[in-house]
C-alpha cells in the first residue's frame, strides 16, 4: 500500500432492476471505504470503462450467459485503469491494466483476479476496450466462425457504426464482400460510407420499409446478415436473404428494453427452412482460444490503416448511467466508453 | 404401346392459387387425352400418391425451393405406380416404379424422366413414399446433419406422429435420447407413447401453455428441437431450450396457410444469441448423396422391428384434394397417401 492510495471511492450501484427501459432511478452513486489490501491484491484507479449492450441482460433477474448484477452491489464493466496500490509484484504501482472493474473511481481487486497488463504503445487506451477488445473480437468471431462470408458475397451489418458493427463491416470489406450497413442517424450513415467505405448504407429511422431499403442496397440479395438489432430488421433480412444465407445472431438491441407483447414478433421464420438459412447465436467468451489470432489480424489492420475505429467518450463517473441509457437508445456514435479518471497517456 | 393402355385419364389440376387456407375450389378434376408415347417414354398407372406439407408452398405464386405448380396444369406428387405402356426397355409393362407423377390415373412420363424401379419385397408399396422415402430421409438428414443429438440428450419433435416426425422421434429413441413428441389428438399422443415408445408426449390442442408442457416433459431442458410446426410451439421451445441447443427447421405447418398478420410472431429470438442456439433450415434434396446410407439404416430398423411407421390411406383420386386439405389441418394420422388405383401387391 502506498501513501497515495485513497481510503474511499465513489461507485455506482444497481439500485433497482429495470422493468423495460433502463431509467436513471435504477442507479445510485455512493461512497464507500476501500478495504485494506491483502497479499496479492491490487487497487486499481479506473481510467475508462466500456459500456456494452449485453450489460442490459445482466441487469435482469433472469440469468443469461453472464452473471447477473446484484441489486445493491456496484455495476461492473470491462475497464482500463492504473495500479494505485499493490500487494502483488506482477502489478506494480503506476502500471496500466485491463480488467473487470466496478463503475467506480477505484476497485480493489482481490488476488489481481482477471487483471492483465496493457501496452499503451499498441493503441490509445480506449482501443483496448474496443477494436482490440471484446466488441471487436465479437465481430471477428461471428464472421470467422458463423458468417464465413466469401469475396463477392453481400454482407449486411445492422448497427454498423456501433462497437461491434464497425469491425464486422470493415472485416467484410477487407474480405472483399459487398458490405451494407444500417445505422440510426444520417451522420452515422455518412460515416459508414465515407470513413468505413461501405458499398451502401441507410438510416433505419428514416426508412419506412426495411425490406425495400435492403433490396435497394443488396441487388443480389443477402448472403450474410450480422445482426446486432433483432426485431423488424431481422424480419426484413430474412425476406431479403438468399438461399443458404448465414445469420450471425450477435445481439438484438432493439428488443432488450421491451417486455411481453412490446417485443417484435418475427412472422417469417418459414424462410429459414425454405432458404436453408443457418442462423446461429454465439458469445465471444466461448471462443477465447482464438484471442491471439484475432489480435494479430486486427492490430495489423489498425496499424496499416486498413481498419479505423470510432470511439464515443463520455466524461465522468456520474455520467455513466446516462451514457448507458443513451447507448441503449443509439445516442452514442461509435463505441461507448466513459472516462472515469485522467488518462496518463493523453498529451 | 400395349393394347390395354388407355386413351384418356382423369387428372386434378390447380384451378386457382389459394389465398391463405387451401379450399376445394382451388382444385378441378378434368379428363384429357393421353399423348402417344415416343421412343423412351413410359405410361404409368398411379397406385399411390404422397401428400406432403411442403406441397402447400408449391401452390403459391412466390417461388420456394421447389418449382411452383402452374395454374391450369395437373398437380404433381411423389408416387408409386405400375408401367401400363412402355417405349422404354428399362421399364417393361407391369413393372412397379417410383416417380413424380400427376395427381391422375395415368401419367405419360417423357423419356422415363425420374422414374426408378421399386422392389415390392422390401416393404409394402406406401412405405416407399414414407419410411423408405422422402419424409423419412428428411428426418434422418435433419438429425444427422443439423440436430446431432447425443445419447442422454433431450429431443423434442413437433408433429411427431406425422410423416417426418415419426422417424425423427424413433431415430432419437434409437440413438438413446430422451424423446418428447407433440401431436394434435389424444389418440396420436397414445400412439407416440405406446407404439413409438417415446418418453413423453402431449396434445398441442388441449395444452393451454406450451412452455409449461415442454418444461414438464423436459425436466432437463431441450437440447434438440426438430420443428415441423413453427409458430407458438417454436417460441415455447426457444424458451425451454438449453445452451447450445440445435433447432432443426424442417417445416412450419402451423404457418403455411396464414397470410400477413395472421402468421405467428415469434418474440423471443434473443434466446438464439444468449443460449448460443444453432438454428438451421434444410431441404432433403440437397442431401441426396446420402440416400444409400439413409436407406441401409432405416430399412434395417424397419426389418428388425426397431422402427415402425403408420400410414393414413385415403381412397380415390377424387378424394385427393380433401385429403390434402385435411392433412394441412392435421386430420391425418400417420403419413398421408392416396390410393389412386389398385395395389397389385395387396392380398
Image: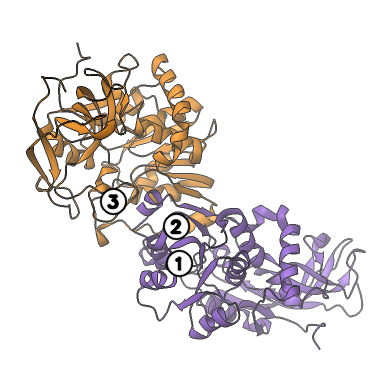
Chain colours: A purple, B orange
Instruction: Tell me, yes or no, whether the two marked residues, 3 and 1, touch with CB atoms within 8 Å.
Output: no
Query: Dividing the picture into quarters, in which one does residue A83 lie?
Result: bottom right
Chain at tag 2: B
In the rendered image, residue A160, in percent from the top left (x then y), is placed at 54, 73
In the rendered image, residue A194, in percent from the top left (x then y), is placed at 57, 82
Query: Dividing the picture into quarters, in which one does residue A204 lie?
Result: bottom left
In front here: A182 or A102? A182
Determine if marks 2 and 3 fall on one subunit. Answer: yes
Q: Residue furthest top?
A: B347
Q: Indicate the secondary structure of the residue bearing disc 1.
A: loop
Determine if marks 3 and 1 fall on one subunit. Answer: no
Instruction: Tell me, yes or no, whether the two marked residues, 2 and 3, touch with CB atoms within 8 Å.
Output: no
Quarter placement of the N terminus of chain B? top left
- Which of the labelled discs sits on residue B269, or is there none? 2
Mark 2 or mark 3, which has the lower sequence index? 3
- Which of the labelled discs sits on residue A255, or is there none? 1
- Which of the labelled discs sits on residue B255, or is there none? 3
Query: How far apart are the alpha carbons under marks 1 and 2?
Result: 9 Å
Quarter placement of the C terminus of chain B? top left
Q: Classify residue A161 as left or right of residue B30.
A: right
Which marked residue is nearer to the observer: mark 2 or mark 3?
3
Amino acid at each position: 500500500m502506498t501513501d497515495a492510495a485513497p481510503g474511499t471511492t465513489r461507485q455506482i450501484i444497481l439500485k433497482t432492476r429495470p422493468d423495460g427501459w433502463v431509467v436513471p432511478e435504477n442507479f445510485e452513486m455512493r461512497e464507500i471505504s476501500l478495504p485494506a489490501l491483502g497479499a496479492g491484491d491490487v487497487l486499481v484507479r479506473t481510467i475508462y470503462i466500456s459500456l456494452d449492450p449485453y450489460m442490459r441482460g445482466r441487469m435482469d433477474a433472469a440469468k443469461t450467459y453472464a452473471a447477473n448484477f446484484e441489486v445493491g452491489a456496484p455495476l461492473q464493466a470491462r475497464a482500463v485503469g492504473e495500479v494505485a496500490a499493490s500487494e502483488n509484484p506482477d502489478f506494480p504501482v503506476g502500471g496500466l491494466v485491463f480488467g473487470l472493474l466496478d463503475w467506480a473511481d477505484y476497485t480493489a481487486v482481490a488476488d489481481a483476479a482477471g487483471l492483465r497488463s496493457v501496452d499503451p504503445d499498441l493503441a490509445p487506451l480506449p482501443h483496448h476496450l474496443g477494436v482490440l477488445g471484446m466488441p471487436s473480437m465479437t465481430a471477428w468471431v461471428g464472421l470467422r466462425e458463423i458468417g464465413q462470408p466469401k469475396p463477392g458475397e453481400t454482407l449486411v451489418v445492422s448497427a454498423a457504426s456501433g462497437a461491434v458493427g464497425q469491425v464486422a463491416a470493415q472485416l467484410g470489406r477487407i474480405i472483399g464482400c459487398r458490405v451494407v450497413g444500417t445505422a440510426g442517424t444520417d451522420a452515422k450513415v455518412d460515416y459508414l460510407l465515407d470513413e468505413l467505405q461501405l458499398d451502401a448504407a441507410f438510416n433505419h429511422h428514416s426508412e419506412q420499409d426495411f425490406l425495400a431499403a435492403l433490396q435497394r442496397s443488396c441487388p443480389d440479395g443477402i448472403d450474410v446478415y450480422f445482426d446486432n438489432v433483432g426485431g423488424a430488421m431481422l424480419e426484413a433480412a430474412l425476406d431479403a436473404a438468399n438461399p443458404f444465407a448465414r445469420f450471425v445472431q450477435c445481439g438484438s438491441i432493439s428488443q432488450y428494453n421491451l417486455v411481453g407483447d412490446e417485443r417484435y414478433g418475427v412472422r417469417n421464420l418459414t424462410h429459414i427452412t425454405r432458404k436453408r438459412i443457418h442462423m446461429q447465436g454465439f458469445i465471444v467468451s466461448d471462443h477465447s482460444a482464438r484471442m491471439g489470432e484475432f489480435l494479430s489480424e486486427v492490430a495489423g489492420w489498425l496499424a496499416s490503416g486498413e481498419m479505423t475505429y470510432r470511439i464515443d467518450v463520455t466524461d465522468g463517473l456520474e455520467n455513466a448511467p446516462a451514457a448507458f441509457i443513451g447507448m441503449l437508445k443509439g445516442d452514442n456514435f461509435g463505441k461507448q466508453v466513459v472516462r472515469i479518471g485522467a488518462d496518463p497517456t493523453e498529451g
